[in-house]
Amino acid sequence: MTKYIQINADISNIPYGDRKKILDAAQKQKDLADLVSGNPDMPMPQFLRERLKEAVDAGYARYTNYYGLPELRQRVSERLAAQRGIIADPDKELLITIGVQEALYVVMRSVLHPGDEVLIPSPHYANYYMNTLACGAKPVLVQLHEENGFVPDIEQLEEAITPKTRALVFCNPNNPLGVVWPREVLEKLAGLAQAHDLLVLVDEIYRDFTYTDQPPSIGSLPGMAERTFTFGGFSKSYMMMGLRVGYVVGPAEPMFHVKNLHYCIALCPPSLGQVAALAALDCPQEVLDELHKEFRERIQLLYQSVTTIPRVTCVKPQGAFYIFPNMKRFGLTSMDLAIQLIEKAGVSTLPGTEFGPYGEGHLRLSVCAKREQLEKGIARLLEFAKKSG
Ligand code: PLP
């Protein structure tokens, strides 16, 4: 590459991950059952499609308000107040973004400084790590243990805090672990954040897919509004991943700058995506109940099947689209096991190490493929296990 193009070191430090090995192995295989994807193979509800068609027919594609349609911000704010006890001024404290993915970046880029440390309970969603690096900050992975149900150990988190620690980032429900941290844990995390003056970034993209008691949103706990950024979105809840609409809520003063950065990189969120998001807020409850039931059933099926494999352990799924079983009994690294499953069994999975080094020994299995695919994937996995003894 010409010496005149030198990639910014913060950006070139972002790891690409080993996903390519998986993709390369998968490409050679014609018949693969997909237990990898976090992108549900399901159409968006008919109700949304009709509203979108009307907007397309009306030629609706202009830029919208930079920070999201005022009506959408108003309605998201009302919903957050009603469902999560989060009170956010739709003009000053709430921004509509190009999915949670953009929201995470604009917030982290606005509040982190070079050298800041960010606590990331891990295994973790890769984006938290990548964004931290992109901001010139340092990710500090704090291991979550299977024996504790992947719930954080507060003392262990506290030990990882230094004068440079600036923020704690996590998702609840969790991708890749499939767990939901309950109220007691969130209260302890809130106490920790207050005692050490930390910001909390909580990604609640899977909140509608909670299969246990719904825990509070950490930003609604006493004293937390001033230090919490809460991320949410429409992608998973309404099967509109590709329409790219999410949001973030946070304290007004930093949100002013977050909004400004969003304007720099996005100008505005997608207009048609926002039409679908507004429609989604009116989506009949029966339609959503059906969707949630489908995922709940699929995840149960996957969990119950995988735990029939002798010496495979798995924390019970409580939310999201995933399970994270411990596959150490196969005596292979996660990557080698995932490759063997592709090559010998015709089933694609993700090695736990795609979610950080503490994922070693695990696979992440998802339920986003169509039911027949899921059933095929399960059958192949069980067959592979049987053959391996
Ligand atoms: N956060 C988590 C934990 C995810 O798993 C995903 C997508 O898989 C995202 C955020 C991205 O969400 P969005 O589509 O709103 O950008």
Image (cartoon, rainbow, N blue to C red):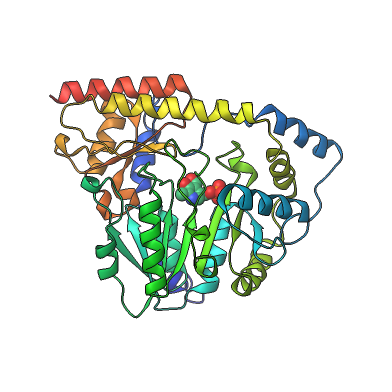
Q: From what the image shows, is residue 322 above or below residue 375?
A: below
Q: Quadrant of the C terminus?
A: top left
| Residue occupying the point 44% across, 52% down | 171
Is 199 or 176 nearer to us in this picture? Answer: 199
Instruction: From the top left corner, tell me how far across and down residue 357 is, in percent.
Output: 26, 54
Residue 5 visible in rendering? no
| Residue occupying the point 58% across, 48% down | 233
Left or right: where 312 falls relative to 31: left
Q: Residue pushed farthest front?
A: 222
Instruction: From the top left corner, tell me how far across and down residue 32 is, in percent.
Output: 39, 26
| Residue occupying the point 68% across, 63% down | 89
Is 159 or 347 nearer to us in this picture? Answer: 159
Instruction: From the top left corner, tell me how far across and down residue 303 is, in percent.
Output: 32, 29
Q: Residue pushed farthest bottom?
A: 163
Q: Residue pushed farthest right?
A: 58
Left or right: where 381 falls relative to 310: right
Instruction: From the top left corner, tell me how far across and down residue 166 is, in percent.
Output: 41, 74
Residue 98: which quarter of the image?
bottom right
Residue 177 visible in rendering? yes
Is 338 or 104 nearer to us in this picture? Answer: 104
Q: From what the image shows, is residue 340 above or below residue 125?
A: above
Left or right: where 160 falls relative to 53: left
Total label count? Answer: 0
Residue 192: which quarter of the image?
bottom left
